[in-house]
C-alpha cells in the first residue's frame, strides 16, 4: 500500500523578497516581482527583451570574490550573512547556494532533528534547467581567449558546473545519507523533482526528502531564449507577463529557487509535525507528438487522466495552478485542456508566472511553494494582467481535427481572477510542462480536507 506523503517545510529564493513570508504577502497582494534588468539593458539593441524576475548576488546576501589571476572569474561567493560554511560555498554556483539557503529554511520549518537529517532514510532530489553558466563562460574565456593555464581555474570548476551540483551541494551541507539525485526535464524540472521525491517516499524507499528546483540568475539562459524570440517585449516590466491576455507575446525569463521538505505522512503525524499539505498523487508523461516545442492537447488530456483518473470527484481541485507562461499557443492549449477535463465550474485558475515570470528549472518548485501558501492562506493567487481576453476562437480551434472546445478564451473569464480570491481551498492541482514534450502534474490537499 503506497504511503501518504506530507509537506512539512518550504523555503527558497524569490525576486524582491527577503523570505517566504514576504513572497506570500506579495503574491496575495497582486504585486509583480518583475523589473527591468540592468544587465540586459546594458547590451542595448542586441537584446529584444530586458525584463526579468531576478535576484542579484548582493540581494542574496552574497558577494562574488574575484580571482586574483583570472579575468572577471568569481573565485567563490562569500556569504555576508554567514549562513553557509565557506567549505560548502567553494563548490557551489549561485543556484546551488540558493538551494542550500532554501534547504536551511525548509528543514528549520520541518522540525527534523540532526539525527533524522543525517540518516540513510533522508534523501535529496533537486534539479535545474541549466546552471554553472557564469562559471563556465568565464573559465573558457580565460583558457581559450586569454591563454591562461588550466591550473589557474582552480580545483572547483567541475563541481560548480556538473549537472547534479544542486543536489550534491545540499547533501554535503546537511550530511544526508540517502538518495542524492536530480531529475532534468526542462521547465518541468522543479515539479518533476518533487514528484520523483514523492514516489520515493510513497514506495517506501525513503522517509524524508529535500526536493525542488533552482535556477541561478544567468545572462546565458536569458540570451538563449531571447534568441528564440519567445520572450515578452514591448510592455512595462510589471505588465510584461500576461498569461491568457490577448496581447501576450512571450514569457519573462526569471530566476529563483523553491525547496520543500517532504516526509512520510505517518512519521510526520506521529512526531506531531506541522503538516502544511499532503501530496495525493503525481503523474508525468510525454506528448508523443514528435514536436520539441509545441504543446499537445491530447498529451495534456492524458496527463489529467493519469493524475486523477476515476477519482475525479474525490480529487476535483478548488484551484488549478497552471503552467501559464504567457506564450500565445501554450496558454490557449492549456486553458482548453483544463476546461475540457474539469468543466467550467467549481474552481479557479492561478497563474503565478504572471507575477514573477518563468523560472525555468525552478518554476515548478517555486509554484509548488505558492500552492502550499494558497492552501495555508485559503486564497487563490491571481492571473495578473489577464485584462483583455480574446473574444474570437484561436486559429487551431477552426481546424477539422481539433477535439476541444470551440469557445474563445473570453468565455472563461470567471475562471481567471485578476486579483487574489479568498475561498475554501482543500485541493490544488499543479501543472508544468517542458521542451521535449514532457508534462508533469501533482495533486495536493490540506492535511484534513
Image: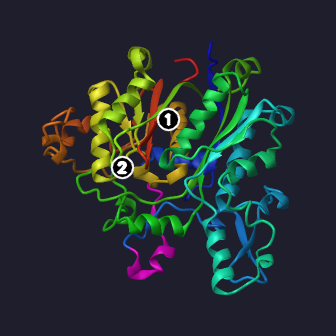
| Circle 1 Cα neighbour tier, 10 Å, few/some/many (<14 / 14–19 / ≥20) | many
| Circle 2 Cα neighbour tier, 10 Å, few/some/many (<14 / 14–19 / ≥20) | many
Q: With 250 as the anchor, is 218 left or right in this view? A: right
Q: Residue under label 2, please give it.
A: 384
Numbered label attached to residue 46: none
- Residue lying at 43% horizontally and 25% vertically, measured from the top left: 306
Element type at marker 2? loop
| Residue 257 among magenta residues | no
Where are the magenta residues, as a range? 31-47
| Location of the N terminus (image quadrant) | top right
| First reached walking from the N terminus: tag 1 or tag 2 | 1
Q: With 144 as the anchor, is 246 left or right in this view? A: left
Q: Residue under label 1, please give it.
A: 374
Against 270, is 160 above or below?
below
Q: Quadrant of residue 145?
A: bottom right
Against 381, is 309 above or below?
above
Measured from the top left, where is residue 282 in percent x and y?
52, 28
Q: Quadrant of residue 132?
A: bottom right
Measured from the top left, where is residue 332 in percent x and y?
27, 44
Amino acid at each position: 500500500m503506497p504511503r501518504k506523503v506530507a509537506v512539512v517545510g518550504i523555503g527558497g529564493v524569490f525576486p524582491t523578497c527577503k523570505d517566504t513570508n514576504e513572497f506570500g504577502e506579495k503574491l496575495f497582494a497582486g504585486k509583480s516581482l518583475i523589473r527591468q534588468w540592468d544587465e540586459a539593458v546594458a547590451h542595448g539593441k542586441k537584446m529584444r527583451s530586458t525584463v526579468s524576475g531576478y535576484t542579484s548576488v548582493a540581494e542574496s546576501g552574497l558577494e562574488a570574490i574575484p580571482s586574483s589571476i583570472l579575468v572577471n572569474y568569481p573565485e567563490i561567493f562569500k556569504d555576508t550573512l554567514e549562513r553557509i560554511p565557506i567549505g560548502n560555498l567553494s563548490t557551489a554556483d549561485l543556484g546551488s547556494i540558493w538551494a542550500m539557503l532554501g534547504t536551511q529554511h525548509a528543514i528549520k520549518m520541518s522540525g527534523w532533528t540532526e539525527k533524522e537529517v543525517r540518516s540513510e532514510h533522508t534523501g535529496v532530489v533537486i534539479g535545474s534547467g541549466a546552471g554553472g553558466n557564469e562559471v563556465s563562460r568565464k573559465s573558457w574565456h580565460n583558457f581559450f581567449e586569454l591563454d591562461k593555464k588550466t591550473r589557474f581555474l582552480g580545483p572547483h570548476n567541475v563541481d560548480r558546473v556538473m549537472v547534479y551540483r544542486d543536489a550534491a551541494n545540499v547533501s554535503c551541507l546537511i550530511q544526508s545519507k540517502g538518495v542524492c539525485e536530480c531529475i532534468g526535464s526542462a521547465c518541468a524540472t522543479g515539479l518533476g523533482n518533487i514528484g520523483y521525491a514523492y514516489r520515493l517516499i510513497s514506495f517506501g524507499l525513503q522517509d524524508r526528502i529535500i526536493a525542488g528546483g533552482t535556477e541561478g540568475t544567468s545572462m546565458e539562459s536569458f540570451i538563449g531564449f531571447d534568441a528564440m524570440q519567445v520572450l515578452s517585449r514591448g510592455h512595462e516590466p510589471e505588465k510584461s507577463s500576461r498569461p491568457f491576455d490577448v496581447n501576450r507575446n512571450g514569457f519573462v525569463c526569471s530566476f529563483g529557487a523553491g525547496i520543500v521538505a517532504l516526509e512520510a505522512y505517518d512519521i510526520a503525524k506521529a512526531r506531531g509535525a506541522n503538516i502544511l499539505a499532503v501530496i495525493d498523487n503525481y503523474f508525468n508523461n510525454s506528448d508523443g507528438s514528435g514536436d520539441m516545442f509545441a504543446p499537445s492537447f491530447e498529451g495534456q488530456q492524458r496527463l489529467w487522466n493519469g493524475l486523477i483518473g476515476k477519482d475525479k470527484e474525490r480529487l476535483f481541485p478548488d484551484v488549478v495552478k497552471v503552467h501559464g507562461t504567457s506564450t500565445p499557443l501554450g496558454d490557449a492549449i492549456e486553458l482548453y485542456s483544463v476546461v475540457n477535463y474539469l468543466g467550467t465550474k467549481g474552481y479557479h485558475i492561478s497563474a503565478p508566472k504572471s507575477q514573477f515570470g518563468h523560472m525555468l528549472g525552478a518554476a515548478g518548485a517555486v509554484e509548488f511553494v505558492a500552492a502550499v501558501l494558497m492552501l495555508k492562506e485559503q486564497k487563490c493567487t491571481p492571473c495578473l494582467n489577464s485584462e483583455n481576453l480574446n473574444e474570437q476562437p484561436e486559429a487551431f480551434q477552426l481546424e477539422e481535427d481539433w477535439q476541444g472546445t470551440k469557445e474563445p478564451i473570453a468565455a472563461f473569464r470567471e475562471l481567471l481572477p485578476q486579483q487574489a480570491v479568498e475561498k475554501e481551498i482543500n485541493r490544488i492541482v499543479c501543472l508544468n510542462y517542458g521542451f521535449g514534450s514532457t508534462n508533469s502534474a501533482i495533486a495536493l490537499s490540506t492535511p484534513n480536507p
